[in-house]
Amino acid sequence: MPATIVANVGQNRRFDITSIAHPSIKARHVEWRKWRLTNRGGDEFIAAFLEQFSNREDDGEFLQRKKMTYCPAFAKNSLKKVRNTIFSRAREIIRDGGPKTYQQAITGKLGGVDRSGSSMNYFMGVKTLDELLKMSIVGIFVDMPRLLGPTLLEKGQAHPYCYVYQAEQIRSWTHHPENPTEFTSLLLVDRNYTYDELTNLPIDECDRYRFIYLKETPEGPRVFVKFYNENSEVVDSFGVVQPELYDDELIEYEEQVGELTKIPFVLLDIGSSLFEDAANYQIAHLNIASSDIWFAARANFPFYTEAYDPRAESQFIRKEAEENFDSFNRFSSTVSTTNASEVTVGPTRGRKYPQGTERPAFIHPSPEPLAASMAKQDQMKEEIKELVDLTLQSLTGTTDTESVLSGLNYISYILQWAETKIAEYWSMYEGKSDIAVIIYPEAPEITDPVDVQTEIVNLLLLIDKTPQISFKKALLKKIARLKLAVDTSPDVLIKIYSEIDASEIIIGDPLNVMNDVNTGLLSLESACLARGYPKDEAEKAADDHAERLKRIQDAQTPAPVDSPGVSGSLIESAQARGIKDKAGDPNAGKQEKSAVADTTTMKNPEDPTRGGGKNQNV
């Protein structure tokens, strides 16, 4: 949209846009810095929080100790476990409906939801969730590329997209009086680059302040935006400073953001960072570990001791007498002429000492203080994990045994709400009334593939135990999400869901289909449908089955013959011929076998039983 010039009459001084900050965040900047450095770790964390022992070391020793210090980033690892636990079930998230560009972008197509190829799962599970857990708040702005014209031809594949605002970039806001989830004004900080004029390559960073607000127009409330640089000078959307008209009037380039009636910004807030308590613990761990490293590197060495006679140190004794106790090289006859109070020690040097005196020796510091400190560090490592869990429990204010699970579900609810707002703003940009439905799974504690498979098996058993067809279909859809969502495209999943909805019969275990047919509860045609076969397969299978029975009967039933002790009816028994479906008497086969084996009436009584098979031992 072309810029509209609006003059602020009566403005006698330029206000400082950089000084504006919401009261609720002014006191949190120190905490934000601590939490961000705790997550970042490395040399920045060490430089910010490693303390100098002013009474025990000088500046040079402190710099040496700092070079040897490592960062115990256990708090970051605990936060990653929470993030991965929630993100691991992202494949179960349902995103149904919405504009076509939305359904394509959430899978990473058309540049993804952020124009960087990110799927919605990646954008929410990595970019957003990670920032939310460590900083307690994060913002998501839904934007739209500037179009060249109003027609679809100019629009091309352009679609709304999202980007994240970190806590430090959200300066101030005013909630809508009728809807606290919406805003009437908002001040954000954009991080941009300054470019070299010749090469057009970035050479430095700069901040641009974006002031977004609702303003009444003849068509109703609409969204407008103004931009300011770091000097509080009004700039256009490209960062070009605009000139002043008069000393008391300032040109303010006010741009209307399309036909938006709501500020497309989502503010996620879980109330407390997971680092709130763990950060201080990690700082304490850093300083204790640094002290131990310094002790192990500089002080943990054996040192030489030797008993001496104080009388020998008298100033009235001739110095020449000291030569009798001087050090010598045991591999050389040369005697050192150095002062007796200065001793050179080492693996190739010895020391002469008088008879009856204690032998010189090397002693070392006691390892008990170092061992106690290392045990304390191990304890602090575990306590950091507990502190993260306790903070997670406190999000919902519950104290029950499943409060960690409640905290995970609470975070999932916040993410679901945020995605719903994104879908709403997406449809608003597209001018569509269809808004996608977002449903996050509960109980995100299942992360092990074995547990996922166990849940699938339990769901299959539940399908056969419930009579409601809608419930069966919902369970089958959940199984499809659990099993296929990771490596299956959303288009295929949507097709699977539609096939499930079109199914008339839902049965979890195929053996139940067979049992229902055998007991007469299910027809062959319905059994075909339950097993996913075409309807006409039942008729074809019946014809094939009849032909099979005839072939078996022709092959195994000889013509009636007179056989001693055996009647013709037993010879023709279908049960004994492998044609059970035509057997009237289920015991006919046993009766025939007994009659054939009866040799009491035969002239030559030989056992008619067949011999052993190929694999039978003879």
Image: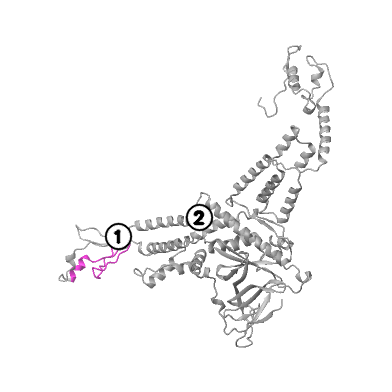
Q: Is 295 situated above or below 564?
A: below
In the foreground, 110 or 72: 110
Give, as a three-letter code, the residue at label 1.
Phe
Is 141 on the left or on the right of 81, as rendered?
right
Whether residue 570 is visible? yes
Residue 611: x and y in percent read 71, 23
In the foreground, 340 or 589: 589
Residue 442: x and y in percent read 61, 52
- Secondary structure beneath disc 1? strand
- Residue that badge 1 annotates: 362
In the foreground, 73 or 63: 73
Residue 508: x and y in percent read 69, 42
Magenta stretch: give its range. 319-346
Name the dominant secondary structure of the magenta segment.
loop
Is 15 on the left or on the right of 470, as rendered?
left
Quarter of the rendering occupied by the N terminus: bottom right
**Residue shown at 30% from the left, 60% from the top:** 362
Say whether residue 332 is magenta: yes
- Give the image quarter of residue 254: bottom right
Quarter of the rendering occupied by the C terminus: top right
Q: Is 409 situated above or below 205?
A: above
Which color scheme does this rendered protein use? one colour
Residue 147: x and y in percent read 73, 73
Q: Are marks 1 and 2 in contact (CB under 8 Å)?
A: no
Say whether residue 411 is magenta: no
Q: CA distance from mark 1 to mark 2?
A: 49 Å
**Residue shown at 81% from the left, 42% from the top:** 535
- Residue that badge 2 annotates: 389
Q: Is 100 situated above or below 239?
A: above
In the current view of this chain or complex, which residue is farthest to the bottom? 246
Whether residue 112 is visible? no
